Image (cartoon, coloured by chain):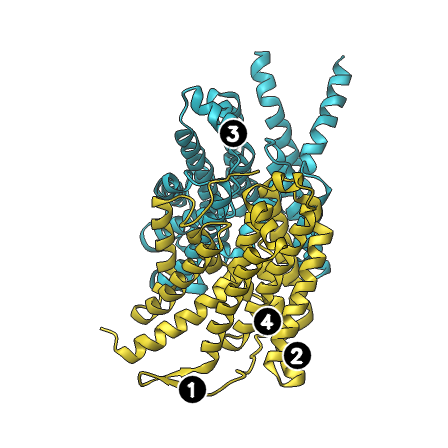
Chain colours: A cyan, B yellow
């Protein structure tokens, strides 16, 4: 009993804080935070657990978003099925490119992923323009029919849905951390020769991690699509390629709550600063350099040990 | 089938584009080979080179002077960036240098937007004359770009093989610790390599400027091609970079003659094929991380 309680304690607290944010801050901000943190979670898992730095996360985001958009624009009306299709597309996509990519060294991996993101951008913008309507994007907000129980076409109820999905994603990643598989991932990051020696296949470990992480990203993509009601090639452009990596580093690499903390900080700063100065890119670029020079632990990474000290001090 | 005239102009176009890709990719490749960093900010020096070329050619009316200015400014900028930022993070993991350089790139593009604005700027072609090769009219400027790239390759080859600094750099690519053990200041080698890389990127930007419109996003537009060149050739190899730059240039140019969207997709397909056979590219080193 106590174990179960302690297992859920961290996640519960994090999400109670999210509810408090929801009460005090406007709805779009809360929605943005949750979707964005799910998006970042995949990248954080790849970077922190398996040691792959992926600059190509927008590629998988767009895969999920466009799969959902195609379904809702051309075929159906049910947003839930749209999300399922987005997830399926994410799995298919990462299974297609995964076996090829995970064999690469981490430096090549980063470059190839970024190249993939740019190629998908071109495909959506130019090559597949008859289907994707190019830069105009697909608008399907009115195509979605409201669903019973939880009507996710309304922003308010979408928030509840996103909240539940976020909770599930965090529970999944926390579970993964605790399993043997999570340990294997870390081991293959630290010393792949020893993993081989122990009889585990580096390739399989990495492929599974790749699929899990990118499916999470695709899920975030389809949630974006449903929340905004439209998709455009803009979401995969190279400028946004760094976003998840930045937030991962900002929050703290390899920590469970880093992506959440990072998303809140990043989205908040973005809103505040884009009100003050128009040149957001300039700011984010120098912020990135500053963070990298200042330390590699990030906000949550440097906060966590202190919090633990405080809490354990109280208990003793 | 494509007729001969179109094919010849396509090949020349591909050669000139390939030369520009080569000049840029060599920076990324050298930086990786010696310092084990992925220096995405080379794309910034490319944009800066192009913009300085634009500004100087507007005021003086001479594009060559502009390209020279762009080259010098890009060199100075890369020196400053190396001193203030990269010197502190050489020891870090490769991911961190990549993110930092991406930050420099994005921030630099922001500065460019603030200084020159968002409007694309044209740079006049310095030599308007056409030359006739087998009955096809070829702009001389494109041939000059190819010649400059060939000269740069020869220069780099001579520098790496005939000078003591160049030999030290080549030895550093093999094993940096041994070079350090010989009493050579490797950080000075790093600085020299970085400045060479930045200067060449600036030069390629200046040479590319008359062929396209100069706009703030130009670095990001050319990025996928540079990546493909570097990946196909193998990080850290100059010969590989030259060969793959020529391949990619031809594929882009001939591909766009056959079917326009092929220009972007075909190099990517080739890259995937080569990675399938050789995960380190054509001439890539097997070294992981020193």
Look at mark 2 in the image and give the residue it sits on: B56
Q: Which-is-in-front pick, marks 3 and 1?
A: 1
Please rate how many residues cluster around mark 4, counting C-alpha atoms within 10 Å: few if below 14, some from 14 to 19, many from 20.
many
Chain at tag 4: B
Q: Is residue A79 left or right of residue B76?
A: left
Image side of residue A177 versus residue A89, left or right: right
Q: What residue is pinned by disc 4?
A: B50
Which residue, given by chain and number where applicable, does mark 3 sit on? A173
Q: Count all numbered tags in the image, as a single digit.
A: 4
Tell whether label 1 touches label 3 (CB within 8 Å). no
Question: Which mark lies nearer to you, 2 or 3?
Answer: 2
For disc 2, the neighbor class at 10 Å (few under 14, some 14 to 19, many from 20) is some
- How many angstroms separate mark 4 from mark 3 (CA)? 46 Å
The 10 Å Cα crowd at callout 3, few under 14, some 14 to 19, many 20 or more, is some
Image height of A43 relative to B156, above or below: above
Q: Earlier in the sequence, mark 4 or mark 2?
A: 4
How far apart in space, not on screen, are marks 1 and 4 (Cα)? 24 Å
- Residue at 65%, 77% (x, y): give it: B55
Image point (61%, 18%), residue name: A6
Distance, label 4 to label 2, CA atoms, is 10 Å
Query: In the picture shown, does residue A275 fall above or below A9?
Result: below
Discs 1/2, front: 1
- Residue at mark 1 to residue at mark 2: CA–CA distance: 25 Å
Residue at image point 67% right, 53% down? B191
Q: Earlier in the sequence, mark 1 or mark 2?
A: 2
Find numbered disc 2 in the image and state the secondary structure of the residue it sits on.
Answer: helix
Q: Separation of disc 3 and disc 1 at Cα?
A: 63 Å
Indicate the quadrant containing the C terminus of chain B: top left, top right, bottom left or bottom right: top right
Q: Are marks 1 and 4 in contact (CB under 8 Å)?
A: no
């Amino acid at each position: 009993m106590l174990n179960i309680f302690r297992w859920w304690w961290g996640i519960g607290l994090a999400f109670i804080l999210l509810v408090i944010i929801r009460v005090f801050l406007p709805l779009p901000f809360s929605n943005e935070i949750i979707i964005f943190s799910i998006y970042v979670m995949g990248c954080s898992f790849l970077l922190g657990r398996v040691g792959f730095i992926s600059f190509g996360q927008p590629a998988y985001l767009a895969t999920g978003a466009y799969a959902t958009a195609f379904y809702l624009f051309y075929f159906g009306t049910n947003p839930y099925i749209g999300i399922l299709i987005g997830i399926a597309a994410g799995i298919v996509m990462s299974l297609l490119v995964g076996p090829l990519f995970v064999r690469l060294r981490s430096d090549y991996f980063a470059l190839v992923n970024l190249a993939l993101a740019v190629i998908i951008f071109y495909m959506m913008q130019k090559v597949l323009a008859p289907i994707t309507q190019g830069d105009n994007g697909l608008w399907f907000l009115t195509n979605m029919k409201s669903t019973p129980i939880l009507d996710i076409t309304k922003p308010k109820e979408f928030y509840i849905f996103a909240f539940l999905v976020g909770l599930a994603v965090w529970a999944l990643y926390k579970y993964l951390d605790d399993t043997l598989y999570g340990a294997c991932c870390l081991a293959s990051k630290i010393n792949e020769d020893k993993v081989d020696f122990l009889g585990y296949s580096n390739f399989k470990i990495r492929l599974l991690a790749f699929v899990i992480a990118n499916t999470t990203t695709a899920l975030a993509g389809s949630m974006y699509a449903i929340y905004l009601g439209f998709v455009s090639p803009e979401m995969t452009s190279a400028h946004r390629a760094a976003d998840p990596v930045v937030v991962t580093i900002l929050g703290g690499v390899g920590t469970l709550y880093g992506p959440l903390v990072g998303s809140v900080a990043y989205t908040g700063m973005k809103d505040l600063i884009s009100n003050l100065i128009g040149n957001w890119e300039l700011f984010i670029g120098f912020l990135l350099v500053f963070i990298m020079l200042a330390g590699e632990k990030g906000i949550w990474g440097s906060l966590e040990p202190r919090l633990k000290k405080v809490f354990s001090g109280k208990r003793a | 089938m494509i007729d001969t005239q179109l094919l010849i102009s396509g090949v020349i176009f591909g050669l000139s584009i390939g030369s520009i890709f080569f000049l840029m990719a060599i920076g990324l490749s050298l930086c990786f080979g010696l310092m084990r960093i992925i220096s995405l900010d080379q794309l910034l020096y490319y944009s800066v080179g192009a913009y300085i070329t634009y500004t100087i050619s507007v005021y003086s009316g001479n594009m060559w002077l502009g390209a020279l200015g762009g080259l010098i400014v890009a060199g100075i900028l890369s020196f400053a960036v190396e001193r203030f930022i990269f010197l502190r993070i050489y020891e870090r993991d490769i991911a961190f240098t990549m993110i930092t350089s991406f930050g420099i790139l994005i921030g630099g593009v922001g500065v460019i937007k603030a200084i020159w604005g968002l409007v694309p700027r044209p740079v006049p072609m310095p030599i308007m004359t056409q030359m006739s090769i087998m009955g096809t009219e070829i702009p001389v400027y494109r041939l000059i770009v190819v010649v400059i790239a060939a000269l740069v390759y020869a220069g780099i080859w001579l520098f790496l093989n005939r000078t003591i600094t160049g030999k030290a750099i080549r030895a550093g690519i093999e094993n940096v610790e041994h070079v350090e053990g010989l009493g050579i200041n490797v950080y000075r080698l790093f600085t020299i390599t970085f400045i060479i890389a930045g200067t060449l990127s600036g030069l390629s930007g200046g040479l590319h400027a008359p062929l396209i419109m100069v706009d703030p996003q130009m670095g990001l537009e050319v990025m996928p091609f540079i990546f493909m060149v570097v990946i196909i050739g193998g990080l850290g190899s100059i010969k590989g970079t030259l060969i793959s730059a020529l391949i990619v240039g031809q594929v882009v140019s001939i591909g766009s003659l056959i079917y326009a969207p092929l220009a972007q997709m075909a190099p990517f397909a080739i890259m995937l094929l080569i990675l399938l056979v050789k995960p380190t590219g054509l001439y890539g080193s097997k070294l992981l991380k020193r």
